[in-house]
Image: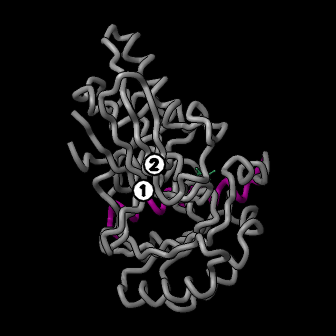
Amino acid sequence: MSVSVFAPASIGNVSVGFDVLGLAVQPVDGTLLGDVVTVEPAEQNALAVVGAFADKLPAEPSDNIVWQCLLLFNQALEQAGKEVEAVKLTLDKKMPVGSGLGSSACSVVAALVALNSFYDNYFSEDVVLKMTGQMEAKISGSLHYDNVAPCYLGGLQLMIADENIITRTLPGFDDCYYVMAYPGITVSTKAAREVLPTQYSKTDLIQYGQTLAGFVDACYRQDKAQAFGQFDDVVAEPYRENLLPGFANAKQYLLNQGCLAAGISGSGPTLFAVTDDKALAESAAIWLKENYLQTDFGFVHVCKADNQGARCISR
Ligand code: HSE
């Protein structure tokens, strides 16, 4: 039996919730923006890496995060007294690394969900979610669920400071388009975290709390004007925008054109713009293609929220 799982791209932080908000997205044209991992029985454990961004990953399989997911998963099986089978994993690396689209989360979630599915969902969703967090912490140096949770569970996720809950699904804005522009350059999450201050002022602290609370309230009331009217990121954007050539100019242009909001997706360099107007989303995408991309690896997708999260695409 072989099983393939797709795990979607996500917007970490969603500007107003540093490390605590994340939204899974999918292109409206049906493109699979995310990674696929296939698990099949084998004589001995093996990993193959294919796909558009395969050559950007470490050559040594044991350095690959998908391989590390297998080790973690097998260790959990052994601890639970379950017999471990040899498998071949194939990672279809469709996502650019260091893009701010939750690329590592896509690989981790696709791998762990595919392995769990291979074992007939032996572990509960909570256990697998904790494993995804453990892997993400290993990769980026700090435990944050804002990419792995939406990637796994879909939709708009709010991280809760209770390890028995971890995340709650918020009512998102399903009529909104999220225009995702990846400029084709790399920004590592670790480096983007290092540029952040270690302390924030009382003014910033109050603004952060008020903005996030206002956003969550607006989600429950489906009030787009409030949700995106006060969409300022005081925690990361002011310090990270220098890492993103043309970001400030692009954001200003998009807001002038009537987009509801724009910000940095995760730790960047991907920019996202929000609008509920399809024609505006399409024209913003064309403008971003012409003005925000830096290399041939860049791309722009008009997306909507992906409320499904990781899913089996073949079995
Ligand atoms: N919340 C994380 C950050 C997202 O902004 O550093 C990146 O994975």
x 64%, y 65%: residue: 269
Report the span colored magenta.
Answer: 199-222
x 52%, y 52%: residue: 103
Q: What type of secondary structure mainly makes up the magenta span?
A: helix
192 left or right, relative to 80? right
Labels 1 and 2 touching (C-beta < 8 A): yes
**Magenta-span inclusion, residue 23:** no
Residue bearing the label numbered 1: 34
* Neighbourhood count class around disc 2 (C-alpha, 10 Å): few under 14, some 14–19, many 20 upward: many
Specify which label sits upstream in the sequence, 1 or 2.
1
235 left or right, relative to 121? right
Q: Amino acid at mark 2?
A: Cys
Tell me if I can see residue 229 in this picture.
Answer: no
Q: Secondary structure at mark 2?
A: helix
The image quadrant that residue 238 belongs to is: bottom right
What is the number of the mark on residue 65?
none
Q: Label 1, label 2: how many angstroms apart (C-alpha)?
A: 6 Å
| In the foreground, 240 or 31 | 31
Q: Position of residue 221 (x, y in %)?
A: 32, 65
Tell me if I can see residue 119 in this picture.
Answer: yes
Q: Amino acid at mark 1?
A: Gly
Residue closest to the far top: 81
Residue bearing the label numbered 2: 106
Q: Position of residue 189 (x, y in %)?
A: 66, 50
